[in-house]
Amino acid sequence: MCLPACAGGGGGGDRSATGAVRASHVRGSGHPATDPAPPPLRTLRPGSVRTAEGQPRIVFDVTRVSSHSAPQFAAARAVWQNLGLPGLIDVHTHFMPANVLRKVRNHFDALGGLWPLTYRGDEDECLALLRGFGVRHFTALSYPHRPDMAAWLNGWAGGFADRTPDCLRSATFYPEPDAHDYVSAALQAGARVFKSHLQVGGYDPRDPLLSDVWGTLADSGTPVVIHCGSGPEPGRFTGPGPFAEVLGEHPRLTAVIAHAGAPEYTAFLDLAERYDRVHLDTTMVFTDFAEARAPFPSDALPRLADLHDRVLLGTDFPNIPYHYPEQLHALAGLGLGPDWLRAVLHGNAARLFGL
Ligand SMILES: [Zn+2]
């Protein structure tokens, strides 16, 4: 079974090539040295967190996380509080049925220490961690690796969204005869984001069985987070070519390119510049881990700055080999300015999802 990392990173890379863009990047779970002392954790009392709509109340169950998490909470909160934001919106997080999650973790564990998972808690603990970091809204991305699986995943994700009001109702699909039917049903049930994973799924996005799916998603304006870059390992249909043809057929599709298209960053920047509904998510990009494997080309940073309204925070939580605040510090360390960072950490997703 192939359930690998949904993570950026390709072959070996020369991290020194991008060292210049990472000048103020602060590692680990500490907070930037220039920041004031982290805020007190009084906001983390149970019951203190609400949805943007004010209801229903979301309980932050502090008993679900160890006291070791407090420095991470403070580090994450310092980033968005110093920007004057109400919190974070993370468009690329993974919640899935327990047996699927177990297989995903087994996959990472089988890599022999190459991808040591930092977060290994159950669903309640992962939710408590996200809320502790100050994530106000997030997704529950799952994805099939074979036929006859997507509708079942969508059923699970619907139930998860029903009991998790800060989760954006998520769904997925696979090229199969009933794909359009269950995608339409998911939209009717309130799905707000879809996930497509070309490497794990091993399918061609140009498959005729998906033509109506792309068309319906384009018509509805529903974002689809698509892993179509060739990191951490290529698939038959990864890389910018196949998905560019889909965009040619469906130029109004609201696509969110996972991992900013790692490692083919510049080719996916081309697509984002050509199609104004194409977004990029930051998942793992610019972290030490990703920079060592698929460094972002420093000469492309101005293009990322220019796309300030279409770059979205994504992290891959909980399947990451470092602390969550590292992603935030990596983005802050790019030096693209507070307006860019506010848009990426919250504003762009708030607008895209109407939050
Ligand atoms: Zn992922």
Image: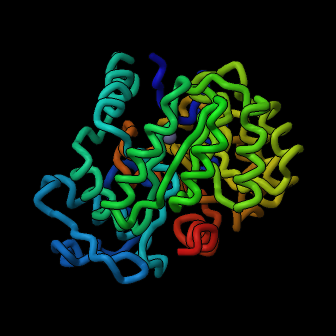
* In the rendered image, the vertical position of residue 314 relative to residue 81, given as above or below: above
Front in this rendered view, residue 162 or 24? 162
Front in this rendered view, residue 268 or 105? 105
Front in this rendered view, residue 106 or 112? 106
* In the rendered image, the vertical position of residue 275 relative to residue 95, given as above or below: below
Specify the quadrant that holds the N terminus: top left
* In the rendered image, the vertical position of residue 261 relative to residue 251, given as above or below: above
Residue in the image at 10% along x and 59% along y: 63
Say which quarter of the image contains residue 117: top left
Left of 39 or right of it: where is 203?
Answer: right
Front in this rendered view, residue 107 or 168? 168
The percent position of residue 352, horizontal first and vertical second, equals 63, 68
Left of 96 or right of it: where is 24?
Answer: right
The percent position of residue 150, horizontal first and vertical second, equals 51, 36
The percent position of residue 29, horizontal first and vertical second, equals 32, 53
Is any part of residue 19 visible from this angle? no
The percent position of residue 218, horizontal first and vertical second, equals 75, 55
Q: Say how many tags the image has.
A: 0
Residue in the image at 17% along x and 63% along y: 61
Residue in the image at 22% along x and 43% along y: 122
Left of 152 or right of it: where is 177?
Answer: right
Say which quarter of the image contains residue 156: top left
Is any part of residue 138 visible from this angle? yes
Residue in the image at 55% along x and 42% along y: 172
Left of 346 or right of it: where is 107?
Answer: left
